[in-house]
Amino acid sequence: MWQAQHVRGQLARLYRGATIDLLGMTTRGDRVLDRPLAEIGGKGLFIKELEMAMADGRADLAVHSLKDVPMDLPEGFVLAAVMAREDPRDAFVSNTYATFADLPAGAIVGTSSTRREVQLRARFPALVIKPLRGNVNTRLAKLDAGDYDAIVLAAAGLKRLSLDERIRELVDIGDSIPAPGQGALGIECRSERADLVDVLAPLADAGTTIAVTAERAFARTLFGNCQTPMGAHAEWLGDTLWLRGFIASPDGSEMLRGEDERVVATADEAHAQGVALASDLLARGAHRFVQP
C-alpha cells in the first residue's frame, strides 16, 4: 500500500486534477504464510491476482516491488515504468546483536529467501536459518517476540516505511548479492494501453531501468525461479555498468559467482551484458543448479 500511495502521489503531482483511486488487494502470497514461497508457487503469487484485476477492468495499473516480478510477464501485460531505486542492500535487524559477525554459533536467523539463506550459510555456517514470512511489521513482531535472534529484510522496505532505526547493519552487496530488481518499483499495465504507457513514462528512471534490465536478463538466461538461489546487481561507475551475479545449488553446497564491467548506454546493451554474464556461469556448470 505504501508503494501504491507513493505512485499515486507522483501521478497526482504530474497530472493536477486527476482522480486516482487505490484498489487494495490481498494476494495468495500475502495470505499463505505457513509455507515457503517456493512450495506454493513462487513470488508470482504476489502479482497474479493484480493482473486479473487489470484484465477484467477493475484496475488500470499495478505497482510491484520489482524483485517480486517474474522475469517473463504473461501475454498482454507490460512493465510500463521502473522508478528510481531505493537502497538495494539486505539489512540485518536484531534487538541484541549489532552485526552478523556478533551472532554466536546456533543463533537463529529468520529469512524467507533462499538467495539470502545460501549466501548467509556460506559466510556463517554455524548459524541456524529458519523460515520467516509475512509483511515487514509481521516479521519485526516475530523478532520482537523472541522467535529469532536476528532477521534479514530488504533495506528498501524498511526505509520506505520509516523504520530505518531497526537496521543494525547494511550488508555489503559483495557479501549478499540482492535479488534482481531489489529496491526498485515496477509499474505494470495492459500492453494494449498505449495511452497509459505514455502517462506513466515520466515516472521511469533511465539509470535504474538500464541496470535492472541487465539483472533481469541475467536471471532470465539462467532460467532462475523461486527454487533456484540466485542474485544479480548492477551499479553505475560513471558510464560503466558493473554487474555481479551468482547462482547456487538448492541446498547451497555449491555456488558460482561472476561479474562483468562494460560501458553501457542503452537497455539493449544492458540486456546483452546480463545474457553474457549468465552464459559465462552456464559454461562453468550453472545448468546443474537449475530445476526444470
Image: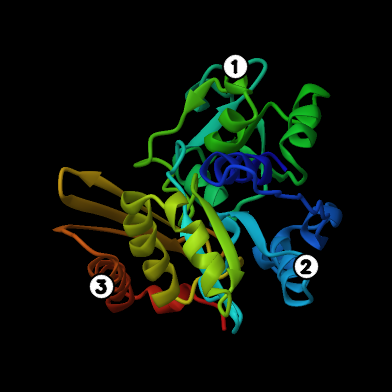
Q: Which mark is residue 28?
A: none
Label 3 belongs to which residue?
272
Which quadrant holds the C terminus?
Answer: bottom right
Q: Secondary structure at mark 3?
A: helix
Cα distance, mark 1 to mark 2? Answer: 33 Å
Identify the disc placed on residue 49.
2
Q: Which mark is residue 165?
A: 1
The mark closer to the camera, 3 or 2, is 2
Residue 33 placement (x, y as % from top left): 83, 52
**Where does residue 240 sit, x and y in percent of width and height?**
16, 51
Secondary structure found at label 2:
helix
Whole-percent x, y for residue 195 in the image: 54, 69
The amino acid on which the numbered mark 2 sits, given as a three-letter code, is Glu
Indicate the quadrant where residue 3 lies: top right
Closer to the chain start, of discs 3 and 2, is 2
Q: Is residue 183 visible?
A: yes
Is residue 282 placed above or below 186 in the rendered structure?
below
**Picture residue at 58% right of the left edge, 74% below the top:** 193
Q: Residues within 10 Å of mark 3 (few under 14, many from 20)?
A: some
Pointer 3 with pointer 1, Cβ within 8 A: no
Foreground residue among 245 and 13: 13
Camera-near label (1 vs 2) is 2
* Separation of marks 3 and 1 at Cα, in angstroms: 39 Å
Three-letter code, disc 1: Glu
Could you tell me the amino acid type at mark 3? Answer: Ala
Where residue 143 sits, quadrant-wise, is top right
For the residues marked 3 and 2, what is the alpha-carbon distance in whole angstroms? 32 Å
